[in-house]
Image (cartoon, rainbow, N blue to C red):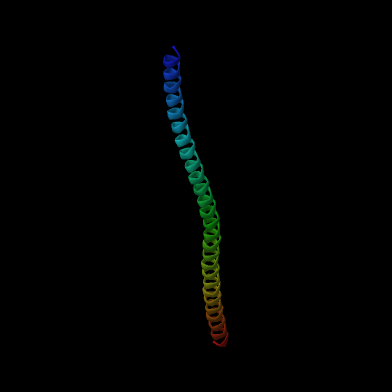
Amino acid sequence: MRRVFAGRMEDEHRRINHRLGKVEETIGEINRLTLSVQSLAESVQRMCKEQERQSERLQTLEDRDGDNWRALMKYLLTGIAGALAGFIASWLGGGMML
């Protein structure tokens, strides 16, 4: 009777040890997965910060091009208005001499 009981207990211990081994493996996998997710989250945060910096740089470049365009248009309109005023003044000045 003792041998039967001892045999059953040994079988149960083997099953429990096997299950514990599986649980330990699973916990190890969960720990690796947790570290991987943490690393991924940090990487995404760095990418977001970099994207914000690039967005600011792009906005600066777009603003500079817009400022240059507005300055060019202002100079062109000033030149055209000056030429037109000069033409009208010379036309009026020439007409008065007649």
Nearest the eye: 27 or 91:
27
Instruction: Say above or below: 33 vs 46.
Output: above
Quadrant (top left/top right/bottom left/bottom right) for the N terminus: top left
Give residue 69's position: percent from left, percent from top. 51, 69
Give residue 51's position: percent from left, percent from top. 52, 56
Nearest the eye: 87 or 69:
69
Quadrant (top left/top right/bottom left/bottom right) for the C terminus: bottom right
Nearest the eye: 9 or 97:
9
In the orientation shown, which residue stands out farthest toward the front?
Answer: 2
Give residue 61's position: percent from left, percent from top. 52, 65
Instruction: Say above or below: 89 vs 74.
Output: below
In the orientation shown, which residue stands out farthest toward the bottom?
Answer: 97
The total of numbered circles placed on residues is 0
Nearest the eye: 81 or 67:
67
Left/right placement of residue 10 relative to residue 67 reads: left
Residue at x 55%, y 81% (from the top left corner)? 86
Instruction: Say above or below: 39 vs 22.
Output: below
In the orientation shown, which residue stands out farthest toward the top?
Answer: 1
Residue at x 54%, y 75% (from the top left corner)? 75
Residue at x 45%, y 36% (from the top left corner)? 25
Give residue 85's position: percent from left, percent from top. 56, 78
